[in-house]
Image: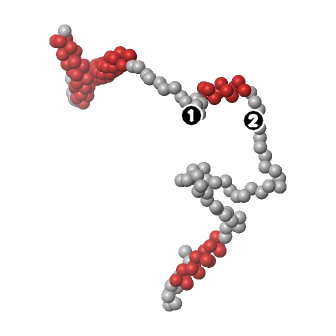
Amino acid sequence: MNTRKHLLSAARLMLPTTGLSLIFAGTYTKSIQSGQLQILIDISSYLFIVLGFVLLVIGVLWTLGHGMKNVLLKRSIRRSRDADVQVFTVDRSDVYPPSYEESQVRNNAVGVVPTVISIPSGMVWPGPAPPVYALTCNESSVEDFSHEEPPTYQQAVQSQTESQTSHLPTNSTVEPL
């Protein structure tokens, strides 16, 4: 039995090697230019090339299939060992929110239409909403957004050149970009 495994593994290694050798031999015989027996050389070279490709493909597929079989066998052995895994659970207390299934059952059973709360028209909203994530719950950022239009390109370039000229000595000049 052990000898058979060694012979099969040697065959798996030799089959692609033999196929590649036959491909090379076929291309070499095809490259030989001889006036005599040219038809016989052509037929043998094409036969070597085709037989080489067939042996190469069979050897590669056999090796891949053998490797996949070994991996699947190892996984099935590992699963059979891990089949008797025990899972321990802890009952949820009322402090935690309900599980997804419980909340879905409650929502479907109640069937209450959600109420919409609206802000009265006379009440003014104090500002933008606080940030969603803050380091502390007391922290809120006050951001006053200005609603003025941004300057035009010409105004921005003009203010940039004015700021550059104010920082330069009096004898230097700045050319706009």
Percent position (x, y) of residue 45? 26, 23
Whether residue 38 is visible, yes or no, is no
Packing grade of label 2 (10 A; few <14, some 14-19, many >=20) is few
Task: Assign a secondary structure to mark 2.
Answer: loop
Please name the amino acid that badge 1 sits on: Tyr
In the displayed structure image, the side of residue 122 where residue 38 appears, left or right: left
Q: Which residue is mark 1?
A: 96
Which residue is at 61% across, 57% downward? Answer: 140
Percent position (x, y) of residue 119? 78, 49
Please name the amino acid that badge 2 sits on: Pro
Label 2 to label 1, Cα distance in Å? Answer: 23 Å
Percent position (x, y) of residue 20? 25, 26
**Whether label 2 touches label 1, CB < 8 Å:** no
Q: Which residue is mark 2?
A: 114
Quadrant occupied by the C terminus: bottom right
Which residue is at 25% across, 23% downward? Answer: 16
Nearer the observer: mark 2 or 1; the answer is 1
In the displayed structure image, the side of residue 46 where residue 85 appears, left or right: right
Q: Residue furthest front?
A: 94
Whether residue 60 is visible, yes or no, is yes
Q: Nearer the viewer, residue 162 or 16?
A: 162
Task: Assign a secondary structure to mark 1.
Answer: loop
Which residue is at 57% across, 50% downward? Answer: 133
Q: Considering only order in the chain, which callout, 1 or 2, is on the residue closer to the N terminus?
A: 1
Q: Nearer the viewer, residue 17 or 133?
A: 133
Percent position (x, y) of residue 157? 60, 74
From what the image shows, is residue 116 above or below residue 80?
Answer: below
Q: Residue furthest top?
A: 1
